[in-house]
Image (cartoon, rainbow, N blue to C red):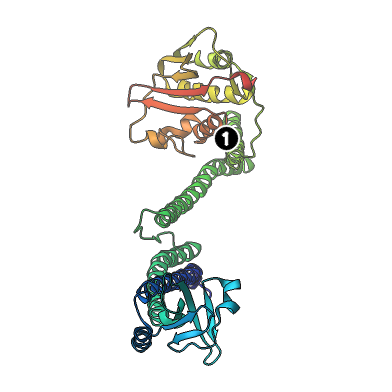
């Protein structure tokens, strides 16, 4: 089965073997070399000791000593005279110093042709002797350390096997711990694709896997919010179009069938049809514009602009519309306002929208426009003395089709998309928009844009 469990587990076991096998080989070589070095050192020490002892021995004692060494140990001893003839030996007969010493010296290896046994030998000269003994050679079988080597080898094999079993167990536990959350995420993802947006993944860790689980849950919430928002959007669009369409259909039917009392009523019906058609046209334009912004297909002609100049221009355009109401328009624009990077047409659209809303919802009092520079930012404020916004409604005012005055929405003539467009346009030009309001005390919208730097010029 081609699953991440087997892939991960196999990878860890292979990695462990790649590390363990060379390590075991190196440890074996170290121990083997240590044994050989120890055997050589021990043989040389014994040769030196025997040479010192033989100084005080006669030939009979040498023979007894040699026999005892051969009987009690696995080592062999050969004593030579001045002519390199063997005086005494415990079992080595074919060894000749002249044949070996020129190539290997007083220490080396020798293979006995009679039994193919390999020895390590060490030779020492016996000084100040009264007898014919001149040199002594001690032979240690190269396999003398074989038993200890086998024990170490078995210990290495057992420890390696134990480590391998531990690695397999650890791999199983680790792989299961890692793959179970991934399998649960896969299951949740399949549920999401089938439309079950309530699927959740339990978050059991704080590492990357836990972060991925939290992201999956956030994705489910965002998809659910998007689905609900889309359903609400379609419902709102349907509602927004149904009302003007019903007006147009009803009054056009009345005109077609001459269901009006007089010419004045006929003109009234035509006027209503015209207004509702304009409302639908504005709604379509706003929807199209908002869609382009959200899909990042909205072109902006960014340049250095002065927000103070734009605010004065927008205020002059709306001044005529406030003469019909008992409203005073006040502009407070500081001198030497720094430039910002933005689209002058879209910035004016933002200010115009906020001013029109302020005028629309203010029956009497003052509408104030203020622009100032502060801490490297250019701030624009539009305040009104309207009915204000309840605190529980403030988080939703920038949503599409949200109206504060639901009962009087059509009297005010908005499409419910104005503030959503304002927010999108502001953020596309690197700015932010905030709102402060108290129910019955008016509302203030605050725009904030960073000052243009020299590199922006």
Label 1: few (<14), some (14–19) or many (≥20) C-alpha neighbours in 10 Å: some
Q: Position of residue 320 (x, y in %)?
A: 55, 14
Residue 370 visible in the shown view: no
Q: Residue furthest bottom?
A: 114
Q: Position of residue 263 (x, y in %)?
A: 61, 30
Where's the C terminus, which quadrant?
Answer: top right
Asked if one can make out residue 155 in the rendered structure from this viewpoint, the answer is yes
In front here: 135 or 144? 135
Tag count: 1
Above or below residue 66? Residue 12 is above
In the image, residue 15 lies at what x, y percent?
A: 50, 67
- Image coords of residue 133 (percent x, y): 45, 78
Residue 122 vertical placement versus 59 (above, below): above
Q: Nearer the viewer, residue 129 or 330?
A: 129
Residue sitting farthest toward the top: 335
User: Which residue carries the number 1 mark?
Assistant: 279
In the displayed structure, 117 sits above or below 432; it is: below
Secondary element under disc 1, as helix, strand or loop, is: helix
Residue sticking out furthest to the front: 130
In the image: residue 66, left or right of residue 240: left
Give the camera-side residue of 394 and 449: 449
Q: Residue at x 42, y 88 (%)?
A: 90
In-image side of 390 versus 85 (left or right): left
**Which one is nearer the viewer's eye here, 261 or 203?**
203
């Amino acid at each position: 089965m081609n699953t991440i469990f087997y892939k991960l587990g196999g990878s860890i076991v292979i990695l462990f073997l790649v590390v363990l096998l060379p390590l075991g080989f190196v440890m074996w070589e170290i121990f083997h070399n240590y044994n050989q070095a120890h055997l050589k050192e021990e043989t040389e020490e014994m040769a030196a000791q025997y040479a010192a002892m033989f100084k005080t021995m006669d030939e009979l004692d040498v023979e007894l000593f040699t026999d005892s060494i051969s009987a009690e140990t696995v080592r062999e001893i050969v004593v030579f005279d001045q002519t390199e003839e063997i005086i005494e030996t415990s079992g080595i007969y074919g060894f000749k110093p002249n044949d070996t010493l020129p190539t290997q010296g007083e220490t080396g290896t020798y293979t006995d042709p009679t039994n193919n046994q390999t020895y390590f030998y060490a030779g020492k000269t016996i000084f100040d002797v009264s007898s014919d003994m001149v040199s002594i050679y001690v032979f240690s079988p190269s396999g003398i350390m074989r038993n200890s080597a086998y024990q170490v080898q078995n210990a290495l094999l057992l420890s390696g096997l134990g480590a391998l079993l531990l690695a397999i167990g650890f791999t199983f536990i680790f792989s299961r711990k890692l793959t179970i959350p991934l399998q649960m995420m896969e299951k949740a993802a399949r549920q999401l694709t089938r439309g079950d947006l309530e699927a959740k993944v339990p978050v059991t860790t704080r590492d990357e896997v836990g972060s991925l689980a939290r992201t999956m849950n956030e994705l489910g919430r965002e998809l659910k919010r998007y689905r609900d928002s889309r359903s609400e959007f379609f419902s709102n669009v349907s509602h927004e179009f149904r009302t003007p369409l019903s007006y147009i259909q009803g009054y056009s039917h009345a005109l077609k069938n001459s269901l009006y009392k007089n010419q004045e009523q006929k003109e009234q019906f035509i006027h209503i049809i015209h207004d509702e058609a304009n409302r639908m046209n504005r709604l379509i334009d706003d929807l199209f514009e908002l869609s382009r912004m959200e899909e990042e297909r909205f072109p902006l002609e960014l340049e250095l602009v002065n927000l103070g100049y734009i605010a004065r221009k927008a205020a002059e355009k709306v001044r005529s519309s406030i003469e019909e109401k008992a409203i005073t328009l006040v502009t407070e624009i500081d001198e030497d306002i720094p430039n910002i990077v933005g689209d002058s047409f879209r910035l004016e659209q933002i200010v115009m929208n906020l001013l029109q809303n302020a005028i629309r919802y203010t029956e009497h009092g003052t509408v104030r426009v203020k622009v100032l520079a502060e801490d490297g930012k250019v701030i624009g404020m539009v305040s009104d003395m309207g009915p204000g916004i309840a605190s529980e409604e403030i988080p939703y005012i920038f949503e599409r089709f949200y109206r504060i005055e639901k009962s009087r929405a059509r009297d005010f003539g908005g499409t419910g998309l104005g503030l959503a467009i304002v927010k999108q346009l502001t953020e596309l030009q690197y700015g932010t928009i905030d709102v402060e309001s108290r129910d019955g005390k008016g509302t203030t919208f605050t725009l904030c844009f960073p000052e243009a730097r020299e590199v922006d010029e």
